[in-house]
Image (cartoon, rainbow, N blue to C red):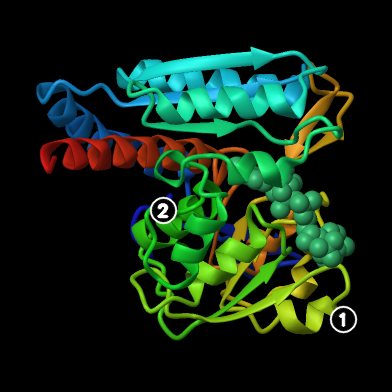
Amino acid sequence: MPRNVSACAKVINIKRGSLTVIMTADLILGKEISQQIYGELDARIDRLKKNGITPGLAVVLVGDDPASQTYVRMKGKMCQELGMHSDTIIMPETTTQEELLARVSELNENPDIHGFLIQLPLPKHIDEQAVINSIDPSKDVDCFHPFNVGRMLIGEPEFLPATPAGVQQLLIRSGVKTDGKHVVVVGRSNIVGKPMAAMMVQKAIGANSTVTVVHSRTEDIGSITRQADILIVAIGKAGFITPGMVKEGAVVIDVGTNHIPDPAAKKGTRLVGDVDENVKEKASAMTPVPGGVGPMTICMLMSNTVHAAERAYERKCSQ
Ligand SMILES: NC(=O)c1ccc[n+]([C@@H]2O[C@H](COP(=O)([O-])OP(=O)(O)OC[C@H]3O[C@@H](n4cnc5c(N)ncnc54)[C@H](OP(=O)(O)O)[C@@H]3O)[C@@H](O)[C@H]2O)c1
C-alpha cells in the first residue's frame, strides 16, 4: 500500500443477502503532504535567516479578477506563516504593457525579492508571453520563462512549475511507483499538462514513466485513459473522467477545480474536480478535490522561493 495516504476504506455492501465488498481508493491528501514539506522549508528558512537572508516573494496582480485576488491573498498569507517577506503589487486593469514591464524590471533588480510572479490571466491588451519573457529567470518561481521551461525539458531544472511539481511530490511521498509505468496526462496547457508530461518522462526520481498526452482533439479518449497506470487529469471539466474511463487499480490525480451549482451549499456552489467521484471504486489511490493537488501548488511555489533565496545566497558567497 502506498505510504502517506489515508487508511484504505472498504465499503461493505449487503445486497440481497449476498456480501459484496467494494474497494474504495486510498486518498492521497495534499493537505497532509504539504504540511510535511512546510516542515522541511521551515528548517531551510531558519538557515537562511541565520545568514541574514529572509526569502522574499512578490506577486503582481493586474486588474480585479476575484479568483486571482483570492490566489494572491493565499500566497501572501502563506509567506507570512512561514516568516518570509512578501510583497503584493496591485495594478489597475488599465495598466499598459510598458507600465507592467517597468514593474517587472524593478522586481528583477530588487535584492529583497528572490522570486516573483505575475498572476495570470492578464488583461487582454497585455502580451502575456512578452511579460513572462522579461522576468529574470533566476527569480522566475512560477517556472514559466522559456529559459526555465527549456532547462526542465532537458532534465536540468532550476525550478519546476508549481502544480506539476506538486503532483510529482504527491506521487513520490505517497510511495506510488512511477518507474516504467504508463502515465496518461489529460490536458496540454503550458501551466499543467505539457510540463507534467515533460517531467514524468525524465530519467529521474518520481518519473521514468511512459507518457501519453490527450487533449480536446484526441479521438476516443477513454481507450487511452483506460491504459493508464497513473492518470493525471487537468482540463477544467467537472466530472469528465468517469469510472468506465479508468483501469481497475489505477492511481488517479485530479488537478481540475470547477465550481458547480449546489443549492445546499452556503455560497450556492461547491468545488469539484475533473474526475467523477465514483472513480474511487475503480482506482487504487486518488486525490480529493478540495484537499488534493490544490494545497500542493502553493506549497511548491513557496519551495521555489526558498530555493531562489538559497541560490542568491550562494551567488553572494561566491563573489
Ligand atoms: N489545483 C491547482 O492548483 C490547479 C492549478 C492549475 C490549474 N488547475 C485547474 O486544472 C484545470 C486545467 O487547468 P489549465 O490551466 O491546464 O486549463 P486550460 O489552460 O484551460 O487547458 C485545458 C486543457 O484541457 C484540454 N481539454 C479541454 N476540454 C477537453 C475535453 N473535452 N477533452 C480533452 N481535453 C480537453 C484542452 O485541450 P486543447 O489544448 O485541445 O484545447 C487544454 O489542453 C482547471 O480546472 C484549473 O482550474 C488547478
Query: Amino acid type of disc 2?
Result: Val
In front: 229, or 46?
A: 46
Seen in the picture, residue 161 relative to 223 is either above or below; the reply is above
* Residue 212 % position (x, y): 65, 80
Q: Earlier in the sequence, mark 1 or mark 2?
A: 2
Q: Quadrant of residue 114?
A: top left
Q: Is residue 305 visible?
A: yes
What is the number of the mark on residue 5?
A: 2
Q: Is residue 18 visible?
A: no
What is the number of the mark on residue 220?
A: 1
In what quadrant does ligand 1 lie?
Answer: bottom right
The quarter of the image holding the N terminus is bottom left
The quarter of the image holding the C terminus is top left
Q: Quadrant of residue 151?
A: bottom left
Dot 2: what SS?
Answer: loop
Q: Residue at x 13, y 30 (%)?
A: 47
Q: Residue at x 86, y 32 (%)?
A: 125
